[in-house]
Amino acid sequence: MEFVKKHKKALIISSVILAIIIVIIILMFTLFSLKSVELSFKTETLNITAEQTKQIEQKTLSYGGSVLFINKDKIVSELEKEFPYLKIVNIETQIPDKFVIHCAEREELFSIESNGKYYVLDEELKILSISNSPDESLVSFEFEGIDYNEQTGQYFATKLNLNLSSAETGQFLTLGSSQSSYFADKMQTISTSVLTAFEQNNRDISYVKSQFEQFEIFYRPERVSETNYIWRTCLRLVDRSGFEYQIVDADINLPEKISVLYSALTAAANEPSLLEGTYLMVYQNANGVFAYSFVER
């Protein structure tokens, strides 16, 4: 009793503070409880239906809890996995009880074949769908790897088997599991930056799909001494007329090299014979200048 009398003022203050905290907690989970979700798309959707939009909203609502404490990263990860065409830009919190999901629809760009299945990917190599037949409107993407012959002690180029039999929609294609990390990093860099490189040259995804039918990453050996080679990582592009372009060291300065590619095509427009029986090679010469050559086949 003596203790209570001595600390009466402190106990009253503590009780008031505790009551305020309890009220705040109750408000957090009532007034600020998630009650409404809205999807806001940047552009019109083609593959995300109205029904899927409702499903996405309901799925988000099912997380429940206070809008101030819900784990948005978890929502983004799980929604983008379940709905492969969905790309969430950010989730905006509108006090007191609403989320606005700002998003876009992923666009189909590449088609990759593995074990008789065709995997449709976007520019970030996310698997959007899987089918039994190719889509001719997409750009076929193939990969060449580097292997090692233990008997001869030499490296050699070989077609890369991606082995996607266990892959599912919503996953991202990772090339590292099929190749040494050095070459895998180069392939991943090129694959996920090629569309951006075209966009920096004012060619959007619609243009790329209409202009090209095939991309391939391959390796060109270049002798540096009597016994040693270095492997140049190259990007081969084949347009829908069958003409071939090769970009050497495509993991470096790709936008600039694509700009050179179009400069070469402008020059060829005035001299069409340059395109006969040749392919176009874009590279960086010994002086560090980006250049091109029409090489006879």
Image (spheres, helix red, strand yellow):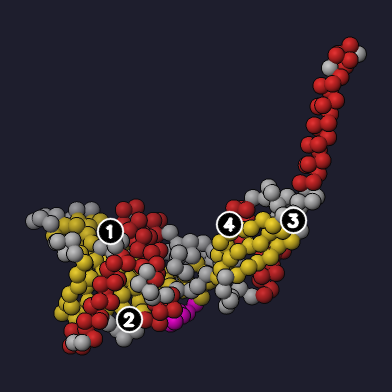
From the viewer's perspective, tell me whether residue 176 is left or right of residue 236: right
Number of residues whose C-alpha sits closer than 10 Å to that of mark 4, classed few (under 14), some (14–19) or many (20 or more): few
From the viewer's perspective, tell me whether residue 131 is left or right of residue 226: right
What residue range appears in magenta? 132-137
Vertical order, 195 against 61 (above or below): below
From the viewer's perspective, tell me whether residue 112 is left or right of residue 79: left
**Residue type of the residue flagged with mark 3:** Asp
Kindly check if marks 4 and 1 are in contact, taking CB atoms under 8 A apart as contact.
no
| Cα distance in 3D space between marks 2 and 1 | 29 Å
Q: Earlier in the sequence, mark 3 or mark 1?
A: 3
Element type at marker 3? loop
Q: Earlier in the sequence, mark 4 or mark 2?
A: 4
The answer to whether residue 144 is seen in the rendering is no
Element type at marker 4? helix
Residue, far left? 226
Q: Which of the two discs, 4 and 3, sits closer to the camera?
A: 3
**Residue type of the residue flagged with mark 2:** Asp
Q: Earlier in the sequence, mark 2 or mark 1?
A: 1
Kindly check if marks 4 and 2 are in contact, taking CB atoms under 8 A apart as contact.
no
